[in-house]
Image (cartoon, helix red, strand yellow):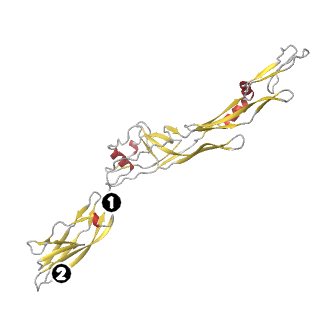
Amino acid sequence: MARIINFSVLDATIPSESESTNLSLELQAQDAYMAKIYINDNTYDGVIDRDRVTWNFPIITIFRSEFPGDGDHELIVRAWVSRGGRRGGEDSRDVSIIVTIFPIITEPTDYPEYTPNYYVDIKANLNDSLIYNGTSISFKGKVVSNTDKYQVVYKLPSGSKTINCGKINANNINNLTLGSFNPTLTITANTDGTQNGVVNITGSNILQTIKEDPTKAQILYWGNSAPKISSTSADILSSLLTKSKVEQLFANEINTLEEMYTYNVVSSWIFDILPVDPVKPPEYNQFDRYAYVNNRTFPNIFYNDEYIVLETAHNYEIKIIDVNGVEQTIIPSTEIFARITHSDKAPLLI
C-alpha cells in the first residue's frame, strides 16, 4: 500500500519587486507509483527519483494575482500518492503554509515640489545635517527659533489700510472756522514682517488777514504758542496756513501716532522640524526620494539654494484697533510656511 513518509512545504514570500514566487517542497512516499500535488485548481504530476522514494515535481509557481491582496495568506497544498491497480492503495496529506505578499513599490519618477507664496526661510547646511546608513537617508529632527544664528528671509503678505483721523479746524481769534485739514493714518504691513504707520495731511491753504491798528504792534500767527511782541515789532497782518505748517504745529502728535503703529509684527517664531526615519528598501522616505529623482548621492543631496518646505502651515493675519476704536484688518488670514534653504556655508541643523 502506498504511504507518504514525508511531505513538507516551506512558507513563501512574494517580494515587492516580483509578481510571483516558486514553492519549495519535498515528498517521499513508500510503494507509490503515482504522485500528484494539488494547489487550488491546479494539479502537478510527479516523477519518482532513482531512490524509488523521493518524488520530483516541475517548478510550481504561485502568483500575487491569485490572492486577494497584500499581507499574509494561508495556502493549502495537498500531496496524493497511489500504488495503482485494483489492489493498490493511496494516501494523501495536506500542508498549510503562509504566503506573505509585500506591496508593489515602484521607483519614484518625481518629487512633489512645492513653492509657497509666503514663508519664513532660514539658510542651513542640509547635507551635513543628514545621516546615511548605507541604504536610506535620515534626519534626527530639530527645533529652530528666531533666536538661533541662522540667516532669515521673510516673504510675508503685504497690505495697507488708510484710516480717517477726523479734521483739524483752523479757527480765527473769534473761534470762527476758516477752513480745515484732513489727517489720515496709513498703516502698512511689509513683506519682511514689519509694520509702519504714516500720517498724511491734506487740505487747501488758508489765508487770514486782519485790519491794521496804528496804536498797536500786531502779529498774526497760527497755533497756541504766541510769538514775542514789543512796541517795536513789525506788524504781520496776514498769514498763510499750509499743510506743511500744520505738520509742524502737530509734529509731536503725528510722531506719537506713527510710532504707535510702527513695530515688528513677527517678534518670534519656532520651526519644529520632525525626524525623518530611515526605511528599508525598496521603500523611500522624503530624502531618499529627492536623491533618487534628482540623481544625487549622499552626502551631496542638495545644491546651494535648493530648499525644503515644512508641511504644516501657519495662519498669518494682522488686525489693529484704529484711533477711532474700530478693528481694522490689514492682512486677512493667509497661510505661510517654514522653508529651509540649503547653503554649504550655513550652520548645521543638529
Residue hosting label 2: 91
Instruction: State the residue at coordinates (17%, 65%).
Output: 59
Residue 346, percent from left and from top: 44, 37
49, above or below 17, in the image: below
**The N terminus lies in which quarter of the figure?**
bottom left
Q: Is residue 165 left or right of residue 118?
A: right
Q: Secondary structure at mark 2?
A: strand
Q: Along the line of sight, which residue is nearer the eye, 136 or 311? A: 311
Determine the image quadrant of residue 161.
Answer: top right
38, above or below 216, in the image: below
Mark carried by residue 235: none
Q: Secondary structure at mark 1?
A: loop
Kindly indicate whether the residue at mark 2 contacts the one at mark 1 (C-beta within 8 angstroms): no
Residue 254, percent from left and from top: 70, 32
Amino acid tagged 2: Asp
Determine the image quadrant of residue 174.
Answer: top right
Alpha carbon distance from label 1 to label 2: 38 Å
Q: Is residue 192 left or right of residue 109?
A: right
Q: Is residue 288 left or right of residue 165?
A: left
**Badge 2: residue crowd in 10 Å (few <14, some 14–19, many ≥20):** some
Most extreme residue toward the right, as rendered? 215
Dot 1 or dot 2, earlier in sequence:
2
Determine the image quadrant of residue 264.
Answer: top right
Q: Along the line of sight, which residue is nearer the eye, 223 or 299? A: 223
Amino acid tagged 1: Pro
Residue hosting label 1: 103
